[in-house]
Image (spheres, coloured by chain):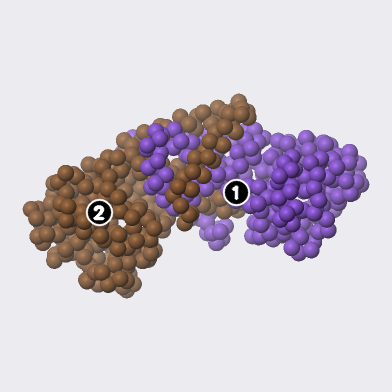
Chain colours: A purple, B brown
Amino acid sequence: MTIIGVGLIGGSLARALKEQNLVGEVVGVNRSRDSLTKALELGVIDHWTTSPAQGVRGAEFVLVATPVLTIPRIVGDIAPALQSGAVVTDAGSVKGGMVLACEELMPEGCHFVGGHPIAGTEHSGVESSFATLYHGSRTILTPTQRTSPEALDLVRQVWEAVGSRVETMDAHHHDQVLAATSHLPHLIAYNVVNTLSDLEEELLAEVFRYAAGGFRDFTRIASSDPAMWRDICIANQEAILDTLARFRASLDMLTKRVRDADRDGLYGVFARSKRTRDRIVTRTGVER
Amino acid sequence: MTIIGVGLIGGSLARALKEQNLVGEVVGVNRSRDSLTKALELGVIDHWTTSPAQGVRGAEFVLVATPVLTIPRIVGDIAPALQSGAVVTDAGSVKGGMVLACEELMPEGCHFVGGHPIAGTEHSGVESSFATLYHGSRTILTPTQRTSPEALDLVRQVWEAVGSRVETMDAHHHDQVLAATSHLPHLIAYNVVNTLSDLEEELLAEVFRYAAGGFRDFTRIASSDPAMWRDICIANQEAILDTLARFRASLDMLTKRVRDADRDGLYGVFARSKRTRDRIVTRTGVER
């Protein structure tokens, strides 16, 4: 197995498979030698190289777990070096367009399956990876008409083996759903913190001081990897702009109700949100 | 001691003081008899009444822990019934204006001290109260020139006894700081969930399904009590409108960067937010 991008996502998959002896040698590929040396020390990988093409030689299974805009380029780089029958998958948070591009790049006898394990923490890097990251998570695979059923099955087995529930979905539909559940909340959390960053230094110091538990929970996702989120914004631009527009219209209505001191209107919007949120939590099970 | 509004905040204070035998009889006052019966069963209070004036008879210490807009009215109702030397404090999240109004209402020999224990969970009601809620929290008291030093000291001792760090601050300054650390994040969390509530039922079902841990953390505060937040918006209207305007300007800039696929601009805003957030967490200590 080869992991291209040995960070939180790739490192956690390698750890989980190794713990169960489900994988032989794991080759790690990264641009940064420091990360690779650390991954080797931690026992997450067995060998490493900074060359993707060299890294996939002899691999049966390849996971590309890098920022989403780099994935087609990396798949293009490794394509000529893949052995026949190799299965390549990815962990990108945006799938539309990218999946077809990667399929096109596959040589005869090799297979690409678009994938997205919905898991993570606000920490990044291989030092943050852990074997149980995927326990209880969901993974979405986005097969196309051209996807090999055997390749799809292998990728499904890999994610299931590490504790994830695997489902399949159309790539564009995936991007719409994720824009709402993940991309919007991340952008908004970044934006809340960014708004505070603009405060005068003295007030900001007090904000730091009185930020309670709720604030820390709320802004946790604003500590996520900036490069990853830059790529997501560009790759899922359309769906993200659509959810941002809906959010802004809703915010303008809320602001008007504050300005009008509209007691019933404010109560209504808060009560409705509370009902929806309580429903979400109940349906998706115990809070993690 | 009398607790007017026996919910999460009032109930937790009563539990914590009782556990340490720091209080004699606790009288609970609420509009809802059900809550009071429950509080009595749980041992949070020893007696109850639905009449605030009747509830404070003989009390040395009164906490008003009700939605912020109701506080001056309740203080007005209890004022004639207070015994000489009684100290009244509150737990409202907005202090400016309200503190002066309550002071005015105090009869000769009785004292009002504005207070705000910065603690809570997304749950409300006496059944959610617990004795350790205030451990490691901060409480802000907002004395004025007229505040009695002895009354201030008593209120300080009460909050310190239950594990809170007490600081004093000007009431209007308190409202500005809280608008940024607490009121903005709550309104934005409500608004994110409200935006999702507008999705078609089918897509909403999928949003529920794929909402991962980050989403649950991010929206936890949107499960807070709607009546409490309606009152906060009206009582702190000016500071909230100011932070909402800053947030919106920042959001418009972020949206423009998404629309322009501005890689450097997006990376810049995310990296800056991450730095600020990591600083906040480091300065305010271990995550709770």
Question: Which residue does the image show at 66% across and 47% down from the upper left?
Answer: A125
* Residue designated by label 1: A123
Q: Which mark is residue B5?
A: none
Instruction: Tell us which disc is closer to us: 2 or 1.
Output: 1
* Residue designated by label 2: B90
- Subunit under mark 1: A
Element under disc 1? loop
Question: Which residue does the image show at 90% across and 46% down from the upper left?
Answer: A83
Q: Can you give x and y, in whole percent of width and height, for residue A43 in the image?
A: 74, 57
- Subunit under mark 2: B
Q: Nearer the viewer, residue B8 or A276?
A: B8
Q: Is residue B167 above or below residue A66?
A: below
Tell me which corner region of the image, top left, top right, bottom left or bottom right, holds residue A66: top right
Separation of marks 2 and 1 at Cα, in angstroms: 39 Å
The answer to whether residue A140 is visible is no
Q: Quadrant of the N terminus of chain B?
A: bottom left
Judge left or right: residue A269 versus residue A90.
Answer: left
